[in-house]
Amino acid sequence: MKPQGVSIIISTRNQENNIGKCIRSSLSQDWPAIEVIVVDDGSADNTLQIAKGFGKKVRIIENKGAGRVAGLNKAIKIAKHPYVCLSAGDIELEKAFVKKIMKFFDKDVAFVSPFTKTGGNSTIYRKGLIEKLGYFDERFNVLGSGFRDDTDMAFRMFDAGYRGILTYSAKIFHASDRERLKTLKEKVMYAQRRVNIHTIDPLLYRKHPARASEFFDIRLGFLRNPVADFKTATGLWHRSREFTLKSPQGVVLLRGDKAGSKVLIFLLGLAYVSLVKLARLYGSVKYWKLMI
């Protein structure tokens, strides 16, 4: 049987240092049918120009600040292949990435992810199923970058009778974010953004009460287990168990290389737990579903 084609959709904004490597890794996949679509969300640097430099090898969508989730939906609608890989401008794929992922697909498999059980970076989906379910919910386009949209889609796919597969056999590589976060101010602003996106969590809980309760480890009907929040902030959620202050997207704010830094990571992790719960409280009012 002829291998099914895969459209790799790269969502990006202001990633001129990484986008070229990202595109090249996508174009060089050891798979017979690949197309690459770059969705630029209004970059103010040279990201768009670099992507255009690949000529006809890459299809471009100028999303002009409409937000990542909206851009993904636009790209999925024009993708020519029956499978879509939703990647980002700071991710490189190993040469055999698509080949390793595609071998897991069976008739009841909706997606295969190298990141989490509910999708995330560089997950490959059945395009037709996304279309059938009405695309990604653009209400999750919080702060322009989107958050929990993949989890919402995964839950909808599970409800439709499909399953997802998590595999670590296919490798993705995050570009170093130290280039973008050189100063303390940049790191504080990034951390603030990571806290604020959790205002969307109550919407996921409202849409999928049972599944989200298990996903978040909800206690007393409204409280996410604080230990789970702490692990998210300090890298302990990941299989590497590296005690580091970083986001799940791989952006490192502080490494626990010394005893003093470990203490600081512990204290900042506690602060993160408190701030995230305040953000969710705000979201609870907005989406009429109590969750902190």
Image: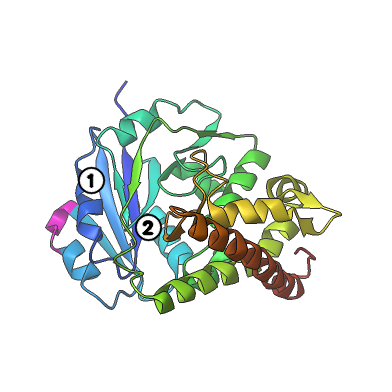
Q: Nearer the viewer, mark 2 or mark 1?
A: 1
* Residue bounds of the magenta highlight: 53-57
**For this view, does 212 lie left or right of residue 176?**
right
**Is 55 contained in the magenta span?**
yes
Query: Which mark is first along the chain, 1 or 2?
Result: 1
**Front position in the image: 138 or 279:** 279
As displayed, is residue 164 above or below residue 56? above
The residue under the point 64% across, 46% down is 155
- Residue 264, given in percent of the width and then of the height, sits at 55, 63
**Front position in the image: 238 or 47:** 238
Q: Which residue is mark 1?
A: 25
In the rendered image, the residue lying farthest to the top is 1
Callout 1 secondary element: helix
Callout 2 secondary element: helix
In the rendered image, the residue lying farthest to the right is 220
Q: Which residue is mark 2?
A: 75
Where is residue 148, by image quadrant? bottom right
